[in-house]
Amino acid sequence: MHKYRLMINPYAIEKWVNDMASQGWHLKKFTWIRFTFERGEPNSYIYRHDELKRFGTHYEEEFLEFLKSSDIEQVDRSGNFVFFRKAAQEGPFELYTDKKTKIGNLSKKMRILLSLILLNLFIGLIGLIGDFSEQTTDWIGFALNTLNLVVVVLFALPFYKLMRIRNRLKRELNVFSD
Amino acid sequence: MTQEHPPLTEGVYYILLALYEARHGYGIMQLVEEMSNGRVRLGAGTIYGAIKTLLERGWIEALDGDGRKKEYIITETGKTVVEYEILRLRELFDNGIRITRGVE
């Protein structure tokens, strides 16, 4: 079964993938928008995502080997983005259990989102001004620049959500060491 | 806080303790869980990140192995760090007991 989702907020996607698994649909393959599921036992696996730091480096190979030796199975990867899974009967499964790494990972995703938001906002606004400054309105330009602004709106909410998670973790770090 | 030996995170402390004997990543994970009676469950990504940092600091070292399951062991510097941490924890413990129970 194929499903289509835009992977803007990986944490929301991860939650969705786990919801699917609880209904017996297990992630098999994925790209940035297309997710392929196959039928299996409900609740038999827990899924986690990760973004690998440096594509194809020695560090990465070692990390993947390390996960494999911990009974963590790599489901599929798309670019630097990877989904892993572990049998649910082996207990709770998290890749990262310390707040500092979690905050670091969130910051990395937020930086990418923010740069896309700002880029689209800039191109969109400058473009819109340009579209109407000529004698005849450039409707194609107008449509494209409106799309830029749609992207801004589309990315703003996930950005805000990630920021809230990060702020909560940071506040906890004020009291708890980890 | 400026201290000569800043507090370790719980994860790093337990990883260092686990490496008084040579272990691979998964072995660390299992021992830490066992030592803490299931309270501390370290994620594989967290352990891997910590191992990298501890190697860089020279607190642990990798043993030559077949590569598939690399083993690590604590160094003398690492042991010194753990000993300072135990002193710090004892101070915390002693002060806590003294004040809450009024006994030494």
Image (tube, helix red, strand yellow):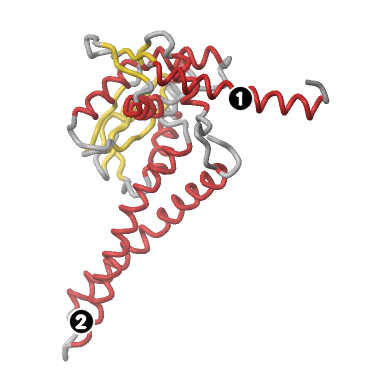
| Residue A169 point in image, percent of width and height | 52, 44
Amino acid carrying mark 1 in the image: Leu
Q: Which residue is mark 1?
A: B89
Image height check: is B101 above or below A157? above
On the question of residue A126 being in view, the answer is yes
| Residue A103 point in image, percent of width and height | 44, 43
Quarter assignment of residue A18: top left
Amino acid carrying mark 2 in the image: Gly
- Mark 1 packing: few (<14 Cα in 10 Å), some, or many (20+)? few
Dot 2 falls on which chain?
Answer: A
| Residue A47 point in image, percent of width and height | 39, 29
Query: Mark 2: which secondary structure?
Result: helix
Image height check: is A41 above or below A134? above
Q: Are marks 2 and 1 in contact (CB under 8 Å)?
A: no
Dot 1 falls on which chain?
Answer: B
Quarter assignment of residue A102: top left
Query: Mark 1: which secondary structure?
Result: helix
On the question of residue A92 being in view, the answer is no
What label does residue A130 carry, if any?
2
Quarter assignment of residue A144: bottom left
State the residue at coordinates (78%, 20%).
B104
Q: Is residue A85 left or right of residue B15?
A: left
Look at the image and tell me in which quarter the N terminus of chain B lies: top right
State the residue at coordinates (37%, 9%).
B22
State the residue at coordinates (22%, 9%).
B66
